[in-house]
Amino acid sequence: MVRKLLRHVYHNFLPAHMRQTLDIFSNLRDRRKIDTPSGKILAIAPHPDDDVIACGGAIYQSFLNDSEITAVYMTDGRKGSTSISEEKLISIRKEEARIAASIIGIKKTIFLDNRDSELALSDKTVSALSEVIKETKPDAVFLPFIMDSHHDHIATNRIFIAALKNLPSVMCYAWGLWTPLSVFNCILDISPYMDIKKKAIESHISQTKEADIVGAVFGLNKYYSVMSGGNGWAEVFIACHSDQYIRLAEVVKW
């Protein structure tokens, strides 16, 4: 009842300039086309193909802008096949990730080797990701959005936020995959790079034979472009500094 009353007061009685002052996430509603991040880039992928699927175009454009890009894979991807044994699949997916990384310009790949579908917040996982962040000193981080629905994607966020507590602020670019973003403030036209992105995704042979991932990605990126006034393909992100991302996580209480 109190919350409903506060919302009523906020929307109906507060002057616009005061609502702006109280709205701590106002910049997240300012949708705009942006230049791709540059400098030192860290892509945090829950599984060995999430980086190329979700933000392969942005990563490749960052590479063309002379960025130094590192990808860290939180889990080993052992659950990604119905026909290959888990232990064999781990090594296959690592090699696929390395090949895909070389196509889109990722300089270094790091595998943290947590079990697929069992990723959890722990001292071990937080320490491991903290070390990666300290080593790479990223200017920008790509990661799944807090509310992306896969268990490992949620756990990745919990680990990332815990790892940030004693580290400097960094720019975050959060993407949606299992749960496509309906709200975003950054749009990146990746039309010139779709062939490269397609080639990188197709390098994950163990995964593309399980499902039409390429078709799904092309459809999603086309949707983002058209709904943003374009006619090509686009990747979209919720972009903000990590201190604001932490506050967003506290509000979501995911």
Image: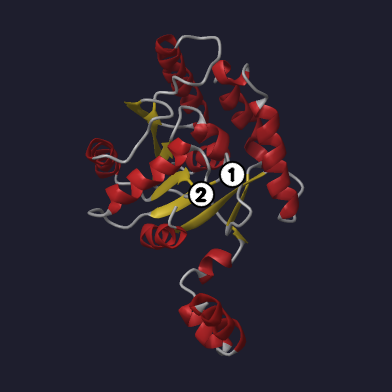
Dot 1 alpha-carbon crowd within 10 angstroms: few under 14, some 14 to 19, many 20 or more: few
Residue 232, given in percent of the width and then of the height, sits at 73, 44
Where is 107 relative to 173, above or below? above
Residue 219, given in percent of the width and then of the height, sits at 72, 37
The residue to which callout 1 is attached is 179
Judged from this view, the residue extending furthest toward the front is: 1
Q: Is residue 155 visible?
A: yes
Q: Quick one: label 1 or label 2, which is nearer the N terminus?
A: 2
In this view, the residue in front, 189 or 203, is: 203
- Residue at screen point 52% across, 49% down: 36
The quarter of the displayed image where residue 44 is located: top left
Indicate left or right for 188 with 102 as reference. Answer: right
Residue 26, given in percent of the width and then of the height, sits at 52, 71
- Labels 1 and 2 touching (C-beta < 8 A): yes
| SS for callout 2 | loop
Where is 72 relative to 91, above or below? below
- Residue at screen point 57% across, 16% down: 205
Q: Is residue 41 visible?
A: no
Residue 24, given in percent of the width and then of the height, sits at 46, 72
Q: CA distance from mark 1 to mark 2?
A: 7 Å
Q: Amino acid at mark 1?
A: Thr
- Residue at screen point 50% across, 28% down: 49
Where is 146 relative to 240, above or below? above
| SS for callout 1 | loop
The residue to which callout 2 is attached is 147
In this view, the residue in front, 136 or 12, is: 12
In this view, the residue in front, 127 or 222, is: 127
